Amino acid sequence: MRFRLALDESKDYDKSVEAHGITFVMDPFAVALIEGIQIDYDDIVEDDFIVTNTAGPSSSC
């Protein structure tokens, strides 16, 4: 499964989740899919976000 991070305007039906002082806004159907993910930022090698699912393999986007 792939995840994508993007800047967008929030919609009335979106769900907000706060983690470590950052508010993430997402489609309410995505909430169950992101359970257990970790988002890191790699500014040393690729200037990229690394999304790791603790229940499965990792990917970057």
Image: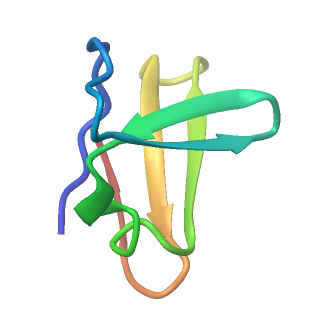
Measured along the vertical axis of the image, is residue 19 above or below residue 43? below
Residue 42 point in image, percent of width and height: 56, 29
Residue located at (37% from left, 77% from top):
57
Residue located at (25% from left, 51% from top):
3
25 or 51, which lies in front?
25
**Quarter-of-image position of residue 2:** bottom left
| Quadrant location, the N terminus | bottom left
Residue 51 point in image, percent of width and height: 44, 52
Give the tally of numbered discs. Answer: 0
**Quarter-of-image position of residue 18:** top right
Q: Residue furthest left?
A: 1
Q: Residue furthest front?
A: 12
Residue 23 point in image, percent of width and height: 62, 30
| Quadrant location, the C terminus | top left
Residue located at (69% from left, 28% from top):
22
Measured along the vertical axis of the image, is residue 20 above or below residue 29? above
